[in-house]
Image: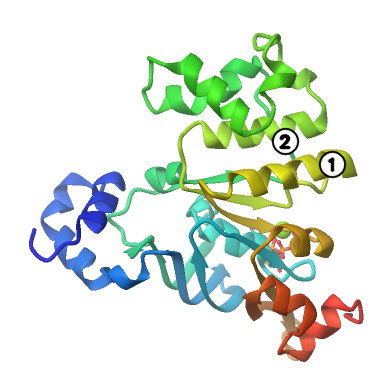
Amino acid sequence: MVNLSPSTEEIFKGMRVRSDDREADTSVANKTTDPANDDIVFDASDLSVFYGEFRAVRDVNMRITRNEITALIGPSGCGKSTVLRSFNRMNDLIPTARVVGTLRYRGVDLYDPRVDPVEVRRRIGMVFQKPNPFPKSIYDNVAYGPRVAGRKKGLDDVVENSLKKAALWDEVKDRLQESAIGLSGGQQQRLSIARAIAVDPEVLLMDEPCSALDPIATARIEELMAEIKHEYTILIVTHNMQQAARVSDRTAFFSVEVDEKSDRRTGLLVEYTTTKKLFSNPDDERTENYITGRFG
Ligand SMILES: Nc1ncnc2c1ncn2[C@@H]1O[C@H](COP(=O)(O)OP(=O)(O)OP(=O)(O)O)[C@@H](O)[C@H]1O
Ligand SMILES: [Mg+2]
């Protein structure tokens, strides 16, 4: 194992490259080692996602910076969820989905066949639009992921710490054995965040996490994101432009192009820059039209 930076080696160990391929680790890692880019968590290069023959989204070139919140905005159908799911290989679960181009996660090609998608999803957790607690106790919901990963000891601490980070502990500490189904929508969404945090991820992908919540619960989640971004890297899809402007450091605006002949709509990344610039002085007219409400 020559010429490998320790960090890259660690990533590969952590990614559990399948043992029969271990000999080949160095070649892949060497190609991707770039110590100067330590703060780049994701590097998407000419990424397209297809469903069968249909190219749902194209030309995604973006670098995601560690400990920042990146917002993905754009009209319905422009591919925000599709792109988000490609960042933790969740699209693998859709049989027709295919990702083309390169997506590196801390220098490692996420779609290298030797990378274990289960480990990818542990490191890169996901919170969905609709909170989806299991019909189990609050405790068991949070302990679920660690248990599946084989953890037996210290579960009480994991549950407490995850609920604390998700700003839910004070509200539930006296009812941990009660069903999670009895929590309010906002509490359930924080429980989803606690569940994602419990397996100790590095990145949280959130797909419209507040769209089913009232303004108070939304504000709570936004505060929470700001509190935890120092420990995690967060990507959030949102239809709420005020939310993107409030919480994120960088924003990516996606749009859709309609092919006249086939009438197919392909999403594309139009502009990706600091949130401040995107909302005050965007470079692209399409961005300007969208953020000022002149779109469509
Ligand atoms: N499982 C799938 N199979 C086939 N096509 C899909 C699938 N999921 C999404 N698509 C298509 O891919 C395109 C992008 O969809 P996607 O859900 O990523 O958009 P979105 O920007 O998240 O939209 P919204 O804001 O409505 O959630 C759409 O044309 C959609 O119909
Ligand atoms: Mg979506």
Amino acid type at image mark 2? Gln
Q: How many marks?
A: 2
Residue on which disc 1 sits: 213
Question: In what element is the residue under mark 2?
Answer: helix
Residue on which disc 2 sits: 189
Q: Is residue 290 left or right of residue 262?
A: right
Residue 162, quarter of the rendered image: top right
Name the quadrant of the N terminus.
bottom left
As displayed, is residue 133 above or below residue 103? above
Disc 1 residue: CB within 8 Å of ligand 1? no
Identify which residue, 16 or 33, lies in the foreground: 33
Q: Position of residue 54 (x, y in %)?
A: 61, 73
Q: Which residue is drawn at 33% across and 65% down?
A: 107
Name the quadrant of the C terminus.
bottom right
Q: Residue at x 36, y 70 (%)?
A: 37
Question: In what element is the residue under mark 1?
Answer: loop
